[in-house]
Image (cartoon, rainbow, N blue to C red):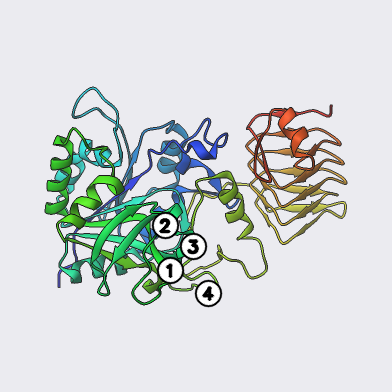
Amino acid sequence: MDRPHVLSIVLAGGEGKRLMPLTADRAKPAVPFGGTYRLIDFVLSNLVNSDLTKICVLTQYKSHSLDRHISIAWRMSTMLGSYVTSVPAQQRTGKQWYQGSADAIYQSMNLIRDEDPDYVVVFGADNIYRMDIEQMLMAHIDSGLDCTVAGIRVPRSEASAFGIIDADVDGKIKEFMEKPADPPGLPDSPDESFASMGNYIFTRKAFVEALNEDAEDVESRHDMGGNIIPAFVSGGDAQVYDFTENDVPGSTEKDKNYWRDVGSIGAYHAAHMDLVSVDPQFNLYNNRWPIWTAQVQQPGAKFVERGTAEDSIVSNGCIISGGDVAYSVLSPNVRVGMWARVEGSVVFNNCRIGRHAQIRSAILDKNVVVDEGVQIGIDKEHDRARGFEVQGNITVVQKNTHVTND
């Protein structure tokens, strides 16, 4: 069998309003994660590790840092025709920006025409997971159907928060429902439902036809999950791919089938806490399926004056000078001063935490300076009074903020 010709499209134009203020000055897929990565690195690593190396990233909202990251980090050899290219909105079909995820691909139809693939992979850009996408592609080809939707099993009691797939026992989708009040159970597990992961594979000809028909429908929201997938379902031409059947090399029993939507501050913070335990929920140290990025050129982390870090990720260039770090993730070039404590927090690049400062259950964006003795995350009402974003139990300090001791 000849190797199928595949074009991968990554939808990376999301505004990420629920992640404000982390998305005040950057696109959601460009938000840092895990110390040295960006959110988009996870889907791009999955594609490249799956040997799907013709990748177009569709961008729109505040995309400068995302475009720069892709151009620096994701250079691949052109000798074998591999590429990762950032494609901004270009108004090819009229004087309007993308009207939805399906319209983004419709307006970029030249990418499909130029590459002339047999199959089109369409994945989102901002979830945390590992997946061998080639296994999903083979399942798509074997099915003979034109549309495959990746589904993850979630407890039925929690399924109303997701787009839900109602499929029969052989995986053919009967209905695609948006946040249903009474989610259907699975044939083999009545207490679970299939939630859509927002990851799709299409046979090229049928996909192009569906995009053209959707573009002509004035009533459509031009959305992949809201319009394109239901169109394939209504034609009996869509199946679900069970994510639990995906076998990623090097995965542990604990992090197998890990998938997190980090669309809110609480979920984003919780996903970081999944990284730092002794036996992590998501193992960044799987060398058989690495997450790729451009690593910062800084010396190794340094601990002086009895500085400590416990159950934490401390990136290159950090200096813990007599302070304590626990259950936290520190990006490169962070300084923690004498007798300061950082606990249960996420600290972005170039932050400075002064002596005696206390940081708890917080996210500090880039270049935040915390003066001596300042407390963040200890008193949430005080945090709000100072103008910080507080969501649930998490305090967020916007980048470039100088936090003085009042």
Q: Which residue is mark 1?
A: 192
The numbered disc on residue 157 is 3
**Cβ–Cβ under 8 Å for marks 4 and 1:** no
Question: How far from the left and from the top, in percent, is residue 6?
Answer: 22, 57
Please tell me which of labels 4 and 2 falls first in the chain. 2
Badge 2 density bin: few <14, some 14–19, many ≥20, Cα 10 Å = many
Secondary structure beneath dot 4 equals loop
Q: CA distance from mark 4 to mark 3?
A: 27 Å
Is 231 left or right of 268, judged from the image as shown?
Answer: left
From the image, state whether disc 4 or disc 3 is nearer to you. Answer: 3
Which residue is disc 2 drawn over? 45
Dot 3: few (<14), some (14–19), or many (≥20) neighbours within 10 Å? some
In the image, taking residue 383 as reference, residue 93 lies left or right, namely left
Q: Is residue 330 above or below residue 248?
A: above
Tag 4: residue type?
A: Thr
Q: Nearer the viewer, residue 73 or 330?
A: 330
Residues under labels 2 and 3: Cα distance?
A: 32 Å
- How far across and down, in percent of the image, does residue 132 sit? 37, 66
Under mark 3, the amino acid is: Ser
Residue at x-position 36% and y-position 33% = 60
CA gap, disc 1 to disc 3?
8 Å
The residue tagged 4 is: 252
